[in-house]
Image (tube, rainbow, N blue to C red):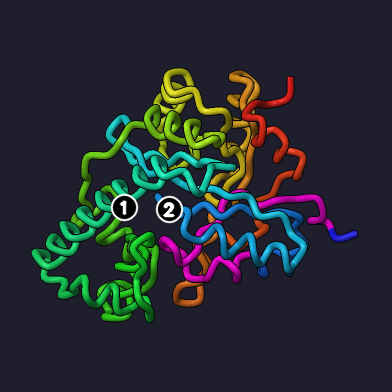
Amino acid sequence: MNQTEGRCDLHTHTRASDGMQSPADNVRRACEKGLSAVAITDHDTVAGVLEAMEEGGRCGINVVPGVEISTRAGGKDIHVLGYYVSCSDEKFLNRLADLRNTREERNVKMIAKLQELDVQITMEEVISGLGRELRPDESVGRPHMADVLVSKGYAKDMRDAFNRYLGEDAPAYVSVPRISPLEAIEWIREAGGTPVLAHPGIYGDDDLVREILEQAKPAGIEVFHSDHGKAEEERYQAMADEYALIVTAGSDYHGARQGVIFHGDIGSRCISVSVLEQLKRGSADN
């Protein structure tokens, strides 16, 4: 038996947001890795879910419809994953469209900041770098800007581009008004989904993580993530136990840029498919 049978990766991105692969490609890669299920969790859009589910039917793999919503709390960007959301809920789709508009506003301001730093790139170059037409329900993200920075020699790779220019503490970063984690969690629940706090270790502030868990009350927490080490996994597993939260795992796969997979490959962080029943009903086993 393949060691990954009965396992799922609950955090992957496609080119519907800032991933490099098509939704169908993600599903095929999950099949190749021997997974039983994979979630499509693009930023502020569910545009890739239908294609992924159709490919899942062909491959015989369970595709979990999902989304990753951008929020702001405690002076930091906080991401909330939503699983089994309705991809046809008009109110939810309109809300996601508003979030993408905010992302577009931020992108324009970041490009302007880069130009002020004498980094000569344009939004037209960023969109052109996609190699295809950008659909209305898709969005451009910082990794797309990083691609242009690398191709024009302003950074040596993706991580360097974020460290030098695009990361939260970097000179070209722009913070725009965003909804709170509580609002995102309410939206997900109203769309029939189950909210999970994404990659808490990235925020570098466990007091803030606890505050979000206590005030916004997500149903779960992403304990296992490509950017979590053993210490983080143990810490967030303990929090999951303390708050009776669903425990999830995800690679946060974005595909390969400049030959480097970002954050991790599909299947590099997995959990038993038994968690899917918890996500469907919105609560951990008692």
Q: Nearer the N terminus, badge 1 or badge 2?
A: 2
Q: Position of residue 253 (x, y in %)?
A: 54, 60
Element type where label 1 sits in the image:
helix
Q: Which of the 4 quarters of the picture holds residue 111?
A: bottom left
Frontmost residue, 39 versus 244: 39
The residue indicated by pointer 1 is: 100
- Was residue 16 drawn as part of the magenta stretch in this picture? yes
- Report which quarter residue 271 is drawn in: top right
Q: Quadrant of the N terminus?
A: bottom right
Q: Residues within 10 Å of mark 2 (few under 14, many from 20)?
A: many
- Name the side, left or right, on which 129 lies relative to 226: left
Q: Is residue 98 above or below residue 25?
A: above
Q: Are the residues flagged by discs 1 and 2 in contact, CB closer than 8 Å? A: yes
**Between 175 and 53, which is closer to the camera in this rendering?**
53
- Name the residue beneath numbered marker 2: 45
Question: Where does residue 221 sit, x and y in percent of width and height?
Answer: 56, 34
Residue 74 drawn at (x, y percent): 31, 30
- The amino acid on which the numbered mark 1 sits, given as a three-letter code, is Arg
Magenta stretch in the rendered image:
3-27
Cα–Cα span, label 1 and label 2: 8 Å
- Residue at the extreme left of the image, as rendered: 116
Magenta: predominant secondary structure element?
Answer: loop
